Image (cartoon, rainbow, N blue to C red):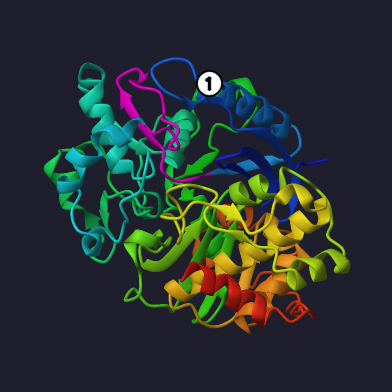
Amino acid sequence: MSLPACTVVLDIGKTNAKLALVDAGTRAIVEIRTTANEVLREGLYPHFDTDRLWSWIVAGLKDYAAKGRIGCISTTTHGAAVAVLGPDGLVLPILDYEYNGPDSVAEAYRPLRGAFWETLSPDLPAGLNAGRQIYWLEETFPSAFGRATAILMYPQYWVWRLTGALAAEPTSLGCHSDLWNPEAGTFSRLAEDRGWAKLIPPVTRPWETAGTIRPALAAKTGLPEDCRVVAGIHDSNASLLPHILRRKSPFTVLSTGTWLITFAIGGSMSNLDPARDCLANVDAFGRPVPSARFMAGREFERLTEGSKAEPSEADIRSVVEKSVMAMPSFAPGTGPYAFLDGHWTVDPETLTAGERVAAASLYCALVASTCMQLTSSAGPVIVEGPLSRSALFLGALAAITGRPVTARADATGTTEGAALLADGPEGAGPGAPDAAPVPPLDIDLSAYAAAWRAALD
């Protein structure tokens, strides 16, 4: 019996890494496996454990090769991660972007980075701007950096591990990196002036074939030697890709996980505020998209202390009627309220687990609505990722914004979008129909939302 034709998607998020086996014809997920994306604290600085991930990837590919005829591998990762390669591989570990080491060069770096309206990239803390990361690495470890022969964004690092090919593509370069001019579609003056642009491979489209897998990897895993690896894509842009291929503007996609990223298709750049974590992402076709974001997953975890409680209607009513509120921001330096210190309006120890989850869900909906306002978002709202499974978040967002909100039932938008790269946009097909919009929460949130916003004002 012949094996089914399949695509493998390697999806490395900030918290977890996933390896999915996808039916090449139907794009249904045949199997998916997950592992923690661990950060190593020892060494020069906190960095991603790429060697452990590689061992896990190779083991997964070997298992999948026995289950499907794999013709293509597509890589997608979180942003703000940079690989500096020399002749023999990494010359420096891949920095964890939450490490605050790059803040030490912030004052020297700011005059170099250019204006917001050139890069549409806000000045972010720690390593969230790839340019600041690279500058810090160059200034702090000049000998190691001097051996650099290539600079790769994170999806393309894994392309190189798989194939030996060097590639670059616009979605990762345009992800608040300071390295790209989204509207011109060229490297920024910073990248040119520092000589980094010469180390970045030629920019191609995410679905272009970067190369075929290394012969030694084919022999080790059982994958066919002609298995293609495409150039790859930034994870939130992978989630966005199916929608821009199949929907008419305007609409909004909320890609959720560690971060909630608002993509306002048909929105406006004019209200973007660089002090409030607004930016332009760059879509798979190289076009700027008004965006805003906050660390919804991280903040929700802190607000609920990891509770999995399902809030009852009584919990929700109690929170609304007593004005129990979480006030931003619980992820310092990020989001539209980056300049505020997060706090509760009541002692959270007095709340039940259900009440805490209810308040955290309303908090995420309110901050998401702020992000939508800042991007001049319009039209229906599609929610993907973990928050698409929260009925309270969805219903609250529909009630607060007065717009239709649809959840992706499979919540695998990143995997679906990355799998599309195997055939390119022409092979996207119509996709699965949307579910019906969720009903707005039947508890009146108008006074609660107004009080929350008034407290911030």
Q: Does the magenta segment cover residue 453?
A: no
Q: Is residue 238 left or right of residue 36?
A: left
Q: Is residue 264 left or right of residue 260?
A: left
- Vertical arrangement, residue 55 with respect to residue 229, above or below: above
x, y percentage for residue 225? Answer: 55, 31
Q: Nearer the viewer, residue 420 or 411?
A: 411
x, y percentage for residue 383? Answer: 64, 66
x, y percentage for residue 49? Answer: 53, 24
Q: Nearer the viewer, residue 330 or 187?
A: 330
Residue at (50%, 45%) from the top-left corner? 78
x, y percentage for residue 425? Answer: 50, 64
Q: In the picture, which quadrant includes the N terminus?
A: top right
In the picture of the structure, the residue carrying the numbered disc 1 is 51
Residue at (40%, 23%) from the top-left corner? 93
Q: Does the magenta segment cover residue 88?
A: yes
Q: Nearer the viewer, residue 352 or 72?
A: 352
Most distant residue in the left direction: 193
Q: Is residue 396 left or right of residue 157?
A: right
Q: Assess disc 1: are there few (<14), some (14-19) or many (≥20) residues with their C-alpha within 10 Å of its C-alpha.
A: few
Q: Amino acid at mark 1?
A: Asp
- Vertical arrangement, residue 37 with respect to residue 372, above or below: above
| Number of dots carrying numbers | 1
Q: Residue 243: in sight, yes or no? A: no
Q: Nearer the viewer, residue 378 or 345?
A: 345
Mark 1 element type: helix
In which quadrant of the rendered view does residue 382 lie?
A: bottom right
Q: Residue 123: in sight, yes or no? A: yes
Q: Which residue range is magenta in the image?
A: 76-100
Residue at (43%, 15%) from the top-left corner? 43
Principal SS element in the magenta part? loop
Residue at (63%, 38%) from the top-left corner? 16
